[in-house]
Amino acid sequence: MLKFRYVGQRPNPYIPTASMADIVFLLIIFFVITYNIEVDKVQVQLPRTLIREDVPRESAYVSVDLQGVIRVSAGKETAVPVPSVEEVQSFAADVVARDPKHAFVVKADRGTRYQVVDRIIDALKQAKVQTIYLLSEQKTVEDQG
Amino acid sequence: MKLAKKKASAEIFTGSMADVTFLLIIYFMLTMAFSSTKGLDFQVPKEDPTRSEVQAEEAVFFQVRPDGSFVVDNKPMPLDQVATYLRTKIDPGSNPPVISKPIILRPAPQAPYGAMMEAFDELRQVKTKLNLAKDLNITLPTQREVENVWGALGVLTP
């Protein structure tokens, strides 16, 4: 059997990792582009629905937790608590004055009494908001029983 | 005697670049997984003075009780029977089928928000379930609107 012999210096075995940074940078660019900044970090149990539409980026948020604390955000800054629903209306009117088509997202706990959500929706309607999204979780087959 | 000067390497060390970028990736992946940015949308109807008033008998009245149960046109009804009931409301002679009657969704003030969303979700699915040509005309009047306008018309008196 013919045997080949290495003539000269044997090269060190190594795995080239120079392109690793390029791949990882590409992944980072992907994540940065598709990343949605969570302006409202209040943990609530969202209602579950089968139909779910994508919320436009940088939509304004109105959130309400089980304790009834209402928070608002115009979409870029972190949500801040407001003392009453009347404040929601003036906040929404201000946002709509700048952009009449700005979408609003209502994020409420599924156990909240509808009365609270009703007053928020009413405040948004009075502020002439055109599109409202009611944030939900995906309903699964197990949920339907 | 002259000491030989060791020449510094002109290379930028990039060995840790991958580590740093991997940390960034892990951060983005973790924070993305927890954000929920989907929901049920509804367009707020524009005020149109030329629109005719809806007569009470023409609309389908969908209530959500404080205990989270549902009543459609004054009949208690589980959600899975709503589509079957609404089949009877299809406009006679319409092909493809259409339900032009407005659906008035009126949850009780004490009803859980989750129950209202279940009802709204079910109504939004009716279009697919009954192969309707267009979406249902779902109206979600607020308490103030009920008291101010609809109440005056006697539309929502149960």
Image: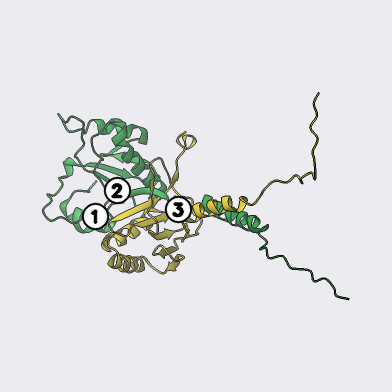
Count of numbered marks: 3
Q: Which mark is residue A23?
A: none
C-beta proximity under 8 Å, tags 2 and 1:
yes
Residue B13: horizontal and vertical position, in percent?
Answer: 68, 61
Task: Identify the image quadrant of the N terminus of chain B.
Answer: bottom right
The secondary structure type at the circle numbered 1 is helix
Residue at image position (24%, 54%) is B146
The residue beneath circle 1 is B146
Residue A53: horizontal and vertical position, in percent?
Answer: 37, 46
C-beta proximity under 8 Å, tags 2 and 3:
no
Q: Is residue A39 left or right of residue B5?
A: left
Residue A12: horizontal and vertical position, in percent?
Answer: 77, 46
- Residue A129 drawn above or below residue B53: below
The residue beneath circle 2 is B106
Q: Is residue A99 left or right of residue B113?
A: left
How much space separates mark 2 and mark 1, taking CA atoms? 9 Å
Query: Chain A's shade in the image?
Result: yellow
Residue at image position (62%, 56%) is B23
Residue at image position (76%, 45%) is A11
Which chain contains the residue that carries disc 1? Answer: B
Q: Is residue B94 left or right of residue A29?
A: left
The residue beneath circle 3 is A109
Which chain contains the residue that carries disc 2? Answer: B
Identify the residue at the far right of this view: B1
How much space separates mark 2 and mark 3, taking CA atoms? 19 Å
Q: Which chain is green?
A: B
**Amino acid at pointer 1:** Val
Residue B110: horizontal and vertical position, in percent?
Answer: 38, 52
